[in-house]
Image (spheres, rainbow, N blue to C red):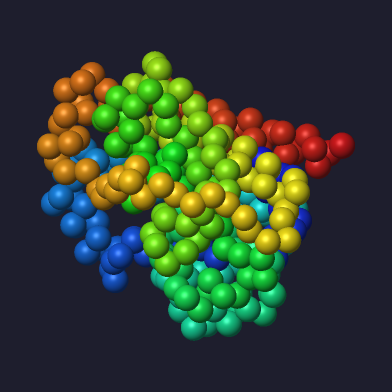
Amino acid sequence: LSDYLARFGSTVSAIVVTSRLPGETSNVRGGLKMLWKSGWDYTRFKLLLNFTLPRRLRRQGLPTRVTDLAELLGHAPEILYCGNVNEPGVLERVRSHRPEILLSAGSTSIFGKEILEVPTVGAINLHSSLLPAYAGLATYFWCLLNDEPESGCTLHQITPALDGGPILDQAAFPMAGIRSVLQVIRLMWKANNDLLLRFFERPPAALSGRAQDKGKRSYHTLPLKKDVRDLLAKGKSLYTPDDIEATVAEAEKLKASVTRAGAS
């Protein structure tokens, strides 16, 4: 969200940070289920993304969360932490801001009917695939495993159908030469920013998208241990040391650019 927040962060009145794994009542239970289903290699990869790498960035004074970046940019939205975005207290605070648009970016909650009725324009979601293909979870893994020639991200309206709302915009990138899941994720970060910049340059008075072709829809959940083994057998990987260093370098570049902008 870095480019989007740099351009439009001053218009964000509140950030809701959800902490509970999708569909789980306990992160411990969800983590154990992931370990049992997806195996140690995939679970370690998720721990890297959510704990190990952020801890390293924090030690270096670099932003790791959207809240860190908002603060670094000098924005002061209300920050709400919760397990699920549909909790009554969260719903009340979101209503108090009278938002035009609710943006879901990596939310671990499924938006319920009440919160979807809050924004005057609508609720939108960034999904990490070219919908209607690869709805669901771990899209970055599946497109690499399946040797897709391209992948990308979709900005779509949130409806009760999971990842099934009308498509507002898409950003694609070629998969040629991509050999790790973390490489795919880093390309998706850029695609997400591109989508948000285009959308918020001319925010609409009403959402108008194209319906998804249900005949082309595919849905995936977390990979199984066998799927991870198949990925590795193809000579691909979940991440490499170079991926990690490139991610750290991007965070350093981001902080430096914000610092220079503030000084000028």
- Above or below, comparing residue 183 to residue 25 in the picture: above
Assign the N terminus to one quadrant of the image. Answer: top right
In this view, the residue farthest toward the top is 177
Assign the C terminus to one quadrant of the image. Answer: top right
- Residue 66: % across, % down: 58, 52
Query: Residue 38: in sight, yes or no?
Result: yes
Q: Nearer the viewer, residue 120 or 45?
A: 120
- Residue 56: % across, % down: 46, 40
Q: Is residue 207 left or right of residue 167?
A: right
- Residue 75: % across, % down: 73, 56
Q: Quadrant of residue 184?
A: top left
In this view, the residue farthest toward the right is 264
- Above or below, comparing residue 45 to residue 92 in the picture: above
Q: How many marks?
A: 0
At 51% from the left and 69% from the top, the residue drawn is 81
Q: Quadrant of residue 78?
A: bottom right
Q: Quadrant of residue 67?
A: bottom right
Query: Residue 126: in sight, yes or no?
Result: no
At 71% from the left and 49% from the top, the residue drawn is 200
Q: Nearer the viewer, residue 158 or 81?
A: 158
At 31% from the left and 36% from the top, the residue drawn is 141
- Residue 21: % across, % down: 34, 61
At 69% from the left and 75% from the top, the residue drawn is 98
Q: Nearer the viewer, residue 223 or 167?
A: 167
